[in-house]
Image (cartoon, grey):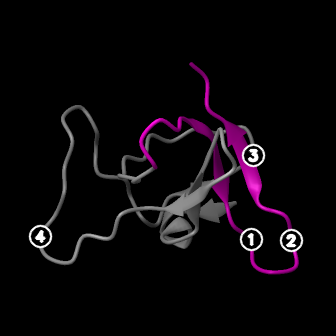
């Protein structure tokens, strides 16, 4: 199981053109979205479980998100979830 807090900074959006970008960093204050609960950072996610996590990524105009990736260091391939239309 992976704690939600362990994913901070490791989530990446890969676009349909192959660009990769990390989440937008907010320096002061909090960013919130309607209908998006604040996740419990200590909750552990196991294979087959789901969790709603809201964050903001900036991508180049005209590109579309193709996948969400979770980086696992330099020696392991990232975990990947395809973006469904």
Q: Position of residue 22 (x, y in %)?
A: 50, 64
Q: Residue furthest left?
A: 29
- Residue 11: percent from left, percent from top: 56, 60
Dot 1 and dot 4 residues touching (CB under 8 Å) = no
Mark 3 Cα-neighbour bin, 10 Å: few <14, some 14–19, many ≥20: few
Considering the numbered disc 4 on the image, is that residue within a helix, a strand or a loop? loop
Give coordinates of residue 83: x percent, y percent: 61, 32
Label 1 sits on residue: 72
- Distance CA(mark 1)–CA(mark 2): 6 Å
**Which of disc 4 and disc 2 is earlier in sequence?**
4
> Which residue is disc 4 drawn over?
29
Residues at marks 3 and 1, CA–CA distance in whole angstroms: 15 Å
Q: Which mark is residue 76?
A: 2
* Mark 4 neighbour density, 10 Å: few (under 14) some (14–19) many (20 or more): few
From the image, state whether disc 3 or disc 1 is nearer to you: 1
What secondary structure characterizes most of the magenta part? loop
Task: Report the magenta residues as a range.
Answer: 60-85
């Amino acid at each position: 199981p992976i704690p939600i807090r362990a994913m901070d900074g490791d989530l990446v959006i890969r676009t349909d053109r192959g660009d990769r970008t990390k989440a937008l960093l907010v320096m002061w204050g909090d960013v919130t979205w309607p209908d998006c609960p604040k996740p419990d950072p200590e909750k552990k996610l196991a294979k087959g479980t789901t969790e709603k996590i809201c964050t903001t990524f900036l991508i180049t105009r005209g590109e579309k998100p193709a996948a969400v990736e979770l980086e696992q260091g330099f020696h392991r391939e990232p975990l990947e979830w395809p973006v469904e239309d």
